């Protein structure tokens, strides 16, 4: 998942970027509003984290600009100002959620996850493809080489998560939280068991496997090149 962070305080930006990178998100940082705007409009992101008070153009103005061109891009607003009025202004400008500084990283992470989940729920009709595998999140159908694959609800959710994040390594912790809504317990092999179920249905019998184990990291869905 690609995240754009627009934050002018280097320490805060660094704290957020490092934390999110540890969770295997790709993060690009803009230190002022104008550069943030350029990046937001030119590149494809899954989420924007936006500070309210910025040099160049303000977070509110930037938020409105992004909304004008990218209605569906989730925006999380950050601010040191915690009054209800500021919150309302931020949400009116088109932010999806709001976080008041100072915050614990876990709070930020929870919001980021919630917003990325919501994105999956709001835009389910996109058909995701990797090689000859197709996953339609709206119809809940998966096909490989044109042949429909029968999956349980959890298997489908896991496959959907992998394909939405294709080419990105997902940790077991992230998978457990997103698909099962639970904290990953190192003692359990639940994720590995389900990955094996999926492999049996998705990859078995095909010359090219799409689900790959990254030792010490997690799993990735990708076309081997
Ligand atoms: Ca600021």
Image (spheres, rainbow, N blue to C red):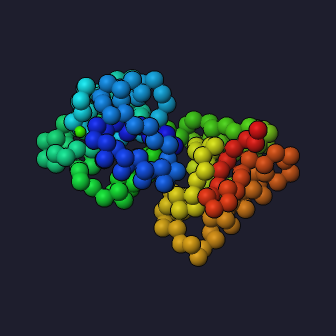
Q: Position of residue 6 (x, y in %)?
A: 34, 36
Q: Position of residue 74 (x, y in %)?
A: 39, 39
Q: Dividing the image into four quarters, tell me where ligand 1 lies.
A: top left
Q: Is residue 122 left or right of residue 92?
A: right
Q: Nearer the viewer, residue 150 or 193?
A: 193
Q: Nearer the viewer, residue 8 or 3?
A: 8
User: Which residue is located at x 67 percent, y 65 percent?
Assistant: 192
Examine the rendered structure and indicate whether residue 10 appears above or below residue 70: below
**Residue 152 can be seen in this image:** no
User: Which residue is located at x 43 percent, y 50 percent?
Assistant: 18
Residue ranking furthest to the bottom: 187
User: Which residue is located at x 80 percent, y 39 percent?
Assistant: 145
Q: Nearer the viewer, residue 39 or 205?
A: 39
Q: Position of residue 105 (x, y in %)?
A: 35, 56
Examine the rendered structure and indicate whether residue 88 appears above or below residue 176: above
User: Which residue is located at x 47 percent, y 35 percent?
Assistant: 45
**Residue 161 can be seen in this image:** yes
Q: Is residue 203 left or right of residue 30?
A: right
Q: Quadrant of residue 130?
A: top right
Q: Position of residue 159 (x, y in %)?
A: 64, 51
* Picture quarter with the C terminus: top right
Q: Quadrant of residue 54?
A: top left
Examine the rendered structure and indicate whether residue 64 appears above or below residue 187: above
């Amino acid at each position: 998942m690609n995240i754009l962070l627009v934050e002018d305080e280097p320490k805060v930006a660094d704290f957020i970027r490092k934390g999110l990178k540890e969770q295997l998100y790709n993060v690009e940082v803009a230190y002022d509003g104008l550069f943030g705007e350029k990046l937001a409009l030119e590149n494809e992101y899954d989420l924007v984290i936006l500070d309210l008070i910025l040099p160049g153009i303000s977070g509110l103005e930037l938020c409105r600009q992004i909304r004008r061109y990218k209605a569906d891009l989730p925006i999380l607003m950050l601010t040191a100002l915690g009054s209800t009025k500021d919150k309302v202004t931020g949400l009116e400008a088109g932010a999806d959620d709001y976080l008041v500084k100072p915050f614990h990283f876990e709070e930020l992470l929870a919001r980021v996850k919630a917003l990325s989940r919501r994105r999956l729920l709001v835009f389910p009709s996109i058909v995701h493809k990797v090689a000859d595998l197709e996953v339609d999140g709206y119809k809940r159908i998966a096909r490989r080489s044109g042949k429909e694959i029968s999956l349980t609800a959890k298997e489908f959710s896991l496959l959907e998560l992998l394909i939405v994040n294709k080419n990105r390594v997902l940790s077991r912790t992230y998978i457990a939280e997103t698909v099962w809504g639970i904290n990953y317990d190192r003692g359990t092999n639940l994720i590995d068991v389900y990955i094996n179920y999926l492999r049996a249905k998705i990859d078995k019998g095909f010359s090219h496997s799409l689900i790959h184990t990254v030792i010490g990291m997690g799993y990735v869905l990708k076309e081997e090149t």
